[in-house]
């Protein structure tokens, strides 16, 4: 036997079943809301557009009171529209990049010993990732120097250079099994050499340093 009570909405005047589907339940009053859910949503929407600041404050208060629900809501929104979420993260990342870097620097300065220990641990735990990070850093550093020298700059993939040369120093022609791997500009940037694939070669760090100090004299 299905017996559904209906209830009239005070706003639109329509009779609808008195269930949580059509009316939200007011726990503190022990009754259903006098507006149907459709009208209630419209009213909230109107309030939000007319009082954006007050609406934001209400949302924030609610979020503080129900952190779990807020997290759940975010998770659901992310799952529903991952591309939008990624775009937002990217934007905020760019907007606050200076602030973030400054905070990171300050933290590192204040915890220098711990940070160094962490670097060392990371280096031993992930030797390959460490090597990749070093190569990336060498690439970025070279681009910056090339910019300062005002020479031709092409996009040079240092991993492609490594593929081309292997672990062999172009200066002394020995294998780089020991010592640091570095990348050298065959014609130095300081002599107007371009930052280009053909002008970048694999070298021992030591050979690189020796060459560059003798050439630039
Ligand atoms: Zn209604
Ligand atoms: Zn060498």
Image: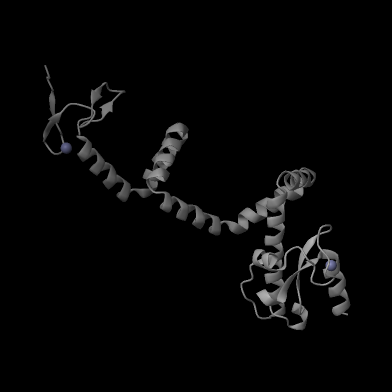
Write down the quadrant of residue 27 in the picture.
top left
Q: Quarter of the picture for ligand 2? A: bottom right
- 31, above or below 160, in the image: above
Q: How many numbered discs sit on the rendered protein? A: 0
Which one is nearer the viewer's eye here, 167 or 197? 167
Write down the quadrant of residue 216 in the picture.
bottom right
Residue 182 appears in the rendering: yes
- 122, above or below 1, in the image: below
Task: Determine the residue positioned at 71% across, 66% down.
Answer: 141
Q: Quarter of the image for the N terminus: give it.
A: top left
Task: Determine the residue positioned at 78% across, 44% down.
Answer: 117
Which one is nearer the viewer's eye here, 111 or 85? 85
Q: Quarter of the image for the C terminus: give it.
A: bottom right
Task: Determine the residue positioned at 32% across, 46% down.
Answer: 48
Q: Is residue 194 left or right of residue 38?
A: right
Q: Position of residue 88 (x, y in %)?
A: 46, 53
Q: Position of residue 181 (x, y in %)?
A: 78, 61
Residue 140 appears in the rendering: no
Q: Position of residue 194 (x, y in %)?
A: 69, 79
Q: Is residue 5 left or right of residue 23?
A: left
Task: Determine the residue positioned at 47% across, 52% down.
Answer: 86
Residue extending furthest toward the bottom: 192
Q: Position of residue 132 (x, y in %)?
A: 68, 56
Q: Is residue 64 left or right of residue 16?
A: right
Q: How is the image coloured?
A: one colour
Which one is nearer the viewer's eye here, 133 or 85? 133
Which one is nearer the viewer's eye here, 84 or 211? 211
């Amino acid at each position: 036997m299905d017996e559904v009570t209906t209830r009239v909405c005070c706003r639109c005047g329509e009779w609808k079943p008195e269930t949580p589907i059509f009316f939200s339940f007011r726990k503190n009053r022990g009754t259903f809301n006098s507006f149907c859910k459709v009208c209630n949503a419209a009213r909230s929407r109107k309030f939000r557009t007319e009082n954006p600041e007050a609406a934001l404050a209400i949302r924030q208060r609610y979020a503080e009171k129900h952190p779990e629900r807020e997290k759940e809501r975010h998770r659901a929104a992310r799952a529903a529209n991952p591309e939008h979420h990624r775009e937002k993260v990217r934007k905020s990342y760019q907007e606050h990049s200076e602030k973030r870097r400054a905070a990171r620097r300050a933290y590192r300065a204040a915890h220098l010993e711990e940070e160094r220990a962490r670097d060392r641990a990371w280096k031993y735990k992930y030797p390959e990732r460490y090597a990749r990070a070093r190569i990336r850093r060498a690439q970025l550093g070279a681009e910056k120097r090339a910019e300062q020298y005002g020479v031709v700059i092409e996009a040079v993939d240092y991993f492609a250079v490594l593929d081309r040369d292997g672990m062999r120093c172009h200066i002394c022609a020995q294998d780089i099994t020991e010592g640091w791997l570095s990348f050298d500009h065959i014609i130095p940037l300081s002599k107007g050499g371009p930052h280009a694939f053909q002008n970048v070669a694999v070298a021992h760090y030591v050979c690189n340093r020796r060459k560059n100090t003798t050439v630039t004299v």
